[in-house]
Image (cartoon, rainbow, N blue to C red):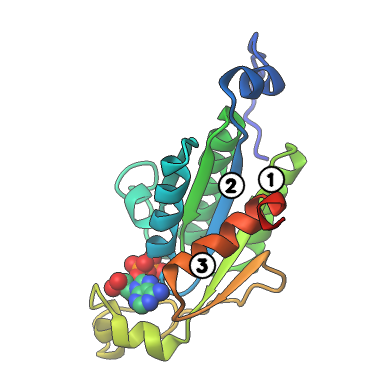
Amino acid sequence: MMTSANVTWHEGVVGRAQRWSSLGVRGATIWFTGLPASGKSTIAAATEARLVGEGRSAYRLDGDNLRHGVCGDLGFSTADRDENVRRTAEVARLFADSGSIAIVSVVSPFESGRRAARALHERDGLHFVEVFVNTPVEECMRRDPKGLYARAVAGQLTGMTGVDAPYEVPSSPDVELLGPCDVTDAVERVLTALEPARAI
Ligand code: ADP
């Protein structure tokens, strides 16, 4: 965790245990990683809809959406991508601590950033579920809903993950979804990893 000089932590009156039990919630973070167009946002949105439909507090933190606000000042250099992942992890941790299920979908191409996101949560006693949406790059390029792969291949866009920027394959994700996969099945597998009791 980064610490700022001359700033001390202000403890609230209500702690996590009291907050969660009083509100009847249980916070956690689900972190979707994978190539652009692998299906992260689609599965994240379906997971959010399923949880909210069950009366749970769940909130999606979509990488593209965060770049409109919290991360609006960041580009796609390695340093900016790292900062994008760091901020996203910090925001997710706050949501999880508040009792919500933060559902992150962000390419997060580097193992170090994903490991740091997990450590940030686990140090704070928060459950973190890493989901690798493993769709082959050929399929992602075929989908290409935003035309980014086509532009990268044509040389009009540089630093595109999967074309001329690296994606480090997760070494030990909690869930690996081999794409293209059925979205309903994918949500089921994610929720089982979130709460193993669901499988019983
Ligand atoms: P990402 O968030 O990883 O960039 P998206 O969720 O936006 O990917 O999906 C990219 C494209 O692939 C979209 O056009 C979406 O409709 C399609 N897609 C997503 N998931 C699936 C799936 N399981 N099967 C087939 N197509 C999918």
Q: From the image, which quarter does the C terminus lie in? A: bottom right
Which of pointers 1 and 3 lies earlier in the amino acid sequence? 1
Percent position of residue 156, x then y: 24, 82
Q: Is residue 181 visible?
A: yes
Q: Which residue is mark 3?
A: 186
Label 1: state its secondary structure. Answer: loop
In this orientation, which residue lies closer to the viewer: 189 or 160?
Answer: 189
Question: In the rendered view, does 26 fall on the left or right side of 150?
Answer: right
Q: Nearer the viewer, residue 52 or 7?
A: 52
- Per the model, the C-alpha gap separating discs 3 and 2 is 16 Å
Q: Amino acid at mark 3?
A: Ala
Tell which circle, 3 or 2, labels the residue nearer the N-terminal end: 2
What is the x, y in percent for residue 64? 34, 56
Q: CB atoms at circles 1 and 2 under 8 Å apart?
A: yes
Marks 1 and 2, Cα distance to the nearest angstrom? 6 Å
Q: CA distance from mark 1 to mark 3?
A: 19 Å
Q: Which residue is mark 2?
A: 29
Say above or below: 134 vs 15.
Answer: below
Element at label 3: helix
**Can you tell which quarter of the image residue 42 is in?**
bottom left
Q: Give the crowd class for mark 1: few <14, some 14-19, many >=20 residues within 10 Å.
A: many
Q: Position of residue 76 (x, y in %)?
A: 40, 64
